[in-house]
Image (spheres, rainbow, N blue to C red):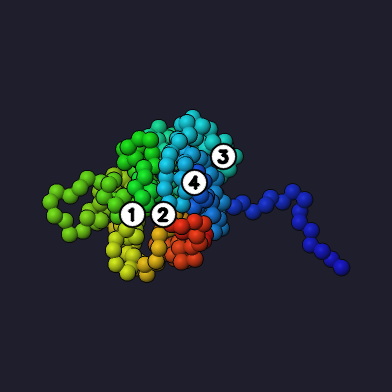
Amino acid sequence: MMTAVMAKDAPAPRQRCVLVFSGADPSGGAGIAADILAIHAQGAHALPVITALTVQDNERVYEVLPVEPDVVLRQARALMARVTIDAVKIGIPGSAANARVIAQVIGELRAALRARPGVPVELPVVLDPVLASGHGDLLSRDDAVQALAVLLPLVTLITPNGPEALALTAPPDGPCDDPAQLAAQALLARGCQHVLITGGHDGGDTVVNRWFSSVPDQGQSWSWARLPGEFHGSGCTLAAAIAGLLAYGYPMPQTLSRAQGYSHRALASAFAIAPGQRIPQR
C-alpha cells in the first residue's frame, strides 16, 4: 500500500494576516476579542496589538487605560519583522500619541511594500472610528476626533455610524437634505479612499448602509432588516470582517457585500451573557 509523503521541509501555506490595533474588552464582546473572531471567520489571521486596557462590561465602559506609545510600537514592529502584513484594522487608539504611532507603522509598512518589486497592491487599512460606547462612554483619554485626524489620510476605508460621521466632520452651514452624504464627501476630501456609513443609529425597520468612494462611478447602498435588541461590538465585527476579506485582495464592492452579510448573520444569532447588549455570534 502506497502513502503520500510530504516533502521533508515543504513550507506550510501562509495564512493572510491582519495587523489589528484595538483595545481589550474584558466582556469579550468588542475590541480585540471581536476582531480576532471576525477576521478568523473570513479565513484570515489576526495579529492583535493592544492599544488600551478597558474596564467595561457588555453595557458600559468605566475606564480606558491607554498602553504607552512605545509599547504599541514595539508590539507592531516585533510582528512586522517576521510576518507579512496583508491588511491593517484600527479600532480605538486609546490616545493621540498612539494614533501617531499607528500612522508611523502604516507608513513603514507601505514603504516596505513599495520597495518590493512586483507588489502592485497598496496595503489596505480599515478604520472603525469608535468615539464612544453605545451608552456614550468615551473611549479615549484625549479628544477622539482630534486623535483620529492623523489617520484619515492613510485610510482605505472608514466605517463610521451616522453620529460618528457627523462628529468627524464640520457641521453643515444651514439646513441640509443629506448630512450623511455631506459628511462622507468631507471624509473623502480628507484622504479616506472609501467611506461606509452604517445606519444602525437611524430609525425605522430597515438599516441602510451607504458606501461612498473617491473612485468615479463607485458607491452603493444596502438595506438590511433591523434586528431587535442591542448588540455589543457590532461595528468592530463589520470593520474586522472587511479587513479580513481585503487581506485576500477581494474587490471593495464584493468585500462590503460579504462582510455586511456575515455581520448581519452574527447579530441575528447573538447571545446573552447578562442583561443588556447581546454578543454577536461570530
Q: Please tell me how crowded label 2 is: few (under 14), some (14-19), or many (20+) other residues with Cα within 10 Å.
A: many
Badge 1 element: loop
Q: Residue at x 36, y 45 (%)?
A: 137
Q: CA distance from mark 1 to mark 2?
A: 8 Å
Q: Is residue 170 left or right of residue 22?
A: left
Q: Please tell me how crowded label 3 is: few (under 14), some (14-19), or many (20+) other residues with Cα within 10 Å.
A: some
The residue lying toward the viewer, choosing from 123 and 28, is 28
Q: Residue at x 47, y 31 (%)?
A: 68
Q: Are marks 1 and 2 in contact (CB under 8 Å)?
A: yes
Across and down, in percent, residue 184 comes to 27, 53
Which amino acid, by three-letter code, is at mark 4?
A: Asp
- Mark 3 — residue? 79
Q: Please tell me how crowded label 1 is: few (under 14), some (14-19), or many (20+) other residues with Cα within 10 Å.
A: many
Q: Residue at x 22, y 55 (%)?
A: 179
Which amino acid, by three-letter code, is at mark 2?
A: Gly
- Mark 2 — residue? 235
Which amino acid, by three-letter code, is at mark 1?
A: Asn
Q: Please tell me how crowded label 4 is: few (under 14), some (14-19), or many (20+) other residues with Cα within 10 Å.
A: many
